[in-house]
Amino acid sequence: MKLQKVLCPEWDHLLAATIITAITAIASLSTPAQAQATPPTDPQIVEIVEAANKIDIGYAKIALKKSEDKQVRGFAQGMINDHCGATHLDGVKSFMLSKGASILQDRALIGAVANDGDADRVMAVGVRPGSDTEMADFVDLTGNHEMWALAKDQLGIVGTEYTNSGLTQRLEKAGIGFEPCPNGDRYVTQRLEELQAQRLDWRRGGEFTGHLIDTDWGPSGDGVRAAALYAAHAVAEGKTFADLHEELPLWHEEMRKLPVASKAVRDTLLQQPEVSDRLGEIAAAFQGTCRQIVRASGTELAVRAWVESSNPAAAQHASRLIMNTLLRASRAA
């Protein structure tokens, strides 16, 4: 069994804390067509996971050796996810472009996966057929795409309120249950444990950000293991990441934030009657077309607005109306 991999050269620049791992072939399968005929066995999947974890551990040791460096310590103190890995897929794409045809035109290419700084989440990048070294046609795969793979052969999965409606509709069509919970991977785990306490065999869930939970693994996300599982799923289906992206059309999402001057403004803006009333009017006007969530940020001096719709123009329009409402009220505060 051979696991081919591409490591992110940006590690030394501290832009990808747990490495970007591009999986170009698994189980010695050279094309997706061959993969269809011989899907990986459970022991092979375990070997994939172990190999991926060894990569992660090895580079974690490199980080520890550099921990006397002020920049590394700052990285470890909360900046490890900033503009890198799963939070900034442009780094993966730039790396793949830098390798040219050896990556982009490799017929064995499944795609690329990226962990965040503490390796508890994963995102992926696919390359559409026909891409060349000048104009690569990349597609991003989020936790929504990965949760569709996790849902295979499951009674149901747990997702947050931000789970894309394209996914929940596909789950419903497939007869797979879906349970929503508040945003945050700890709430995903909590809801799974509640369902298990009711003797329901629900073990998997996640967030669109790539935090994926399988309670057979543990109570929190393991981005390295999830990446290996997702790659193995692609091989078993005889598909590339680009194929998996195409088979799950998602609703268009608009995510915006409004910086505010103070904590007081942030914490009271949405409580103002004129703001809450106007947001209610916008929600009513787009009922059945858009879904919106507006809330104060828990980490920044900002208010965030998220809107999704099967109609991109409607999502953009609703988002603009929401942001204009927030902006006017913040200026008057």
Image: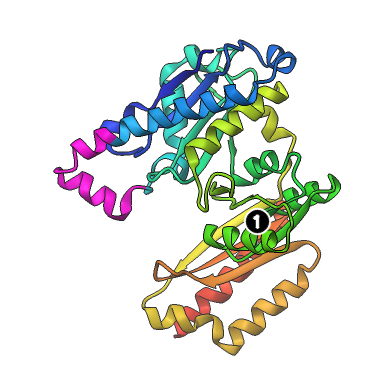
Q: Which residue is mark 1?
A: 159
Image side of residue 165 versus residue 175, left or right:
left
Quadrant in the picture for the C terminus:
bottom left
The picture places residue 277, in percent across and down from the top left corner, at 66, 84
The amino acid type found where label 1 is placed reads Gly
In the foreground, 292 or 116: 116
Quadrant in the picture for the N terminus:
top right
Q: Is residue 122 above or below residue 99?
A: below
Give the quadrant of residue 289: bottom right
The residue positioned 51% from the left and 32% from the top of the image is: 113
The picture places residue 67, in percent across and down from the top left corner, at 19, 43
* Extent of the magenta region: 61-80
Which element is circle 1 on?
strand
Q: Is residue 272 above or below residue 259?
A: below
In the foreground, 85 or 148: 148
Colour style of the rendered protein structure: rainbow
The residue positioned 37% from the left and 49% from the top of the image is: 82
- The chief SS type of the magenta part is helix
In the foreground, 97 or 68: 68
Asked if one can make out residue 316 in the rendered structure from this viewpoint, the answer is: no
The picture places residue 104, in percent across and down from the top left corner, at 53, 17
Image side of residue 258 versus residue 80, left or right:
right
The residue positioned 26% from the left and 32% from the top of the image is: 12
The residue positioned 72% from the left and 52% from the top of the image is: 201
